[in-house]
Amino acid sequence: MPLSFCIVDDDASARRMLQHIIEDSGLGEVVGTAECGQEGVSLILSETPDIVLMDLLMPDQDGIETIISLQAQGCRSKFVMISQIENGDMVSRAYKSGIEFFIRKPINKIEVESVLYKVNERYAMGRYLDEIKLTLGKLEGLQFGMPQMPSGKRSVKEIIQPILMNMGMISENGSRDIITIMELAVAGENSGSLPPLKELYEMAAATYKPVPADAAKEVKAIEQRLRRALAAGLANLASIGLTDYGNPKFEHYAPLYFDFEEVRLKMKEIEQGRDTGKVKVNIKKFLQVLHLEVLEGMGR
């Protein structure tokens, strides 16, 4: 089912351009547009779109005020801010109001597509997790009175998946590699310690079917997938931290799995609405911490 969009921007040419990009790229359907904040509130509450593109500066009220007003009235749409302003305080306020991403003016087709694809992925994952929670809630009634499986009997995958979900990484291709690497690590003779990264990558590559013809190339691909997955997790936690520094997910996962200096740098990038490319992820630390959590979860 295609996602629905609303666009709120006082620039008619910007509205037309965004609508063409969304619909021509197959990102979804634009169900309505508005040229000011008050008109936008009425439109969005009426159409209940999945995603809203909101201009930051409008004649009657700014985009942040409009988003806060909508949320106060129960709106659950995802918001993307459109702005030509890169003021750090303003960007920080926007993220705290609940936006997902920024799109800079003048509008660039490639940037818009890239940002909205990411928003679509987040929306789809959020809907998927809601369905899981609903299913689990229904199953609780069926499982009432049944003996619970001891923690030591849980599989590596059952332990890791909730952790990756909480960090916003479960939809990344690298999550499969992480699970495989941990399964191999705890199955080894010396499961109490983690082998060198290259050895782990080689072991994982050897288990994939069909077996990769070029082992060295697959090892490199695994490392790249891990970096992308960890970068996504770090970015997600940084976004949570900006919105609520005391959020339990942020407080637990950010300093435990990542170098906190990098988390702070990512938070600063998000506040400023730019990607410097300077944020690094420490794969070794991440896997070492996860390895310890898996062993604990298995009762070892």
Image: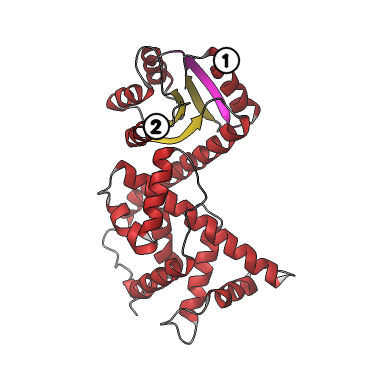
Q: Mark on residue 140?
A: none
| Residue at 47% in and 18% down | 9
Is 142 above or below relative to 147?
above
**Span colored in magenta:** 27-35
Indicate yes or no whether the magenta region holds residue 159: no
**Whether residue 35 is situated above or below residue 49 in the rendered picture:** above
Q: CA distance from mark 2 to mark 1?
A: 24 Å
Instruction: Look at the picture and state if 4 lies above or below 236.
Output: above
| Residue 170 appears anywhere in the view | no
In front: 159, or 166? 166
SS state under label 1: helix
SS at circle 2:
loop
- Residue drawn where x is 50% and y is 47% of the image: 276
Percent across and percent down for residue 239 are 38, 45
Where in the figure is residue 218, as x and y percent of width and height? Answer: 66, 67
Residue drawn at (54%, 13%) of the image? 12
Q: Nearer the viewer, residue 126 or 71?
A: 71
Q: Position of residue 95 (x, y in %)?
A: 37, 36
Please state if 66 lies on the left or on the right of 216 as rendered.
left
The residue pinned by badge 1 equals 13
Where residue 159 sits, quadrant-wise, is bottom left
| Comparing labels 2 and 1, the label whose residue is closer to the camera | 2
Quarter in which the C terminus is drawn = bottom left
Q: Amino acid at mark 1?
A: Ser
From this viewpoint, is residue 57 visible? yes
Q: Nearer the viewer, residue 290 or 126?
A: 290
Judge by depth and name the residue closer to the eye, 299 or 199. Answer: 199
Tag 2: amino acid: Asn
User: Looking at the image, which residue is at 47% across and 60% down?
Assistant: 281
Q: Which residue is mark 2?
A: 87
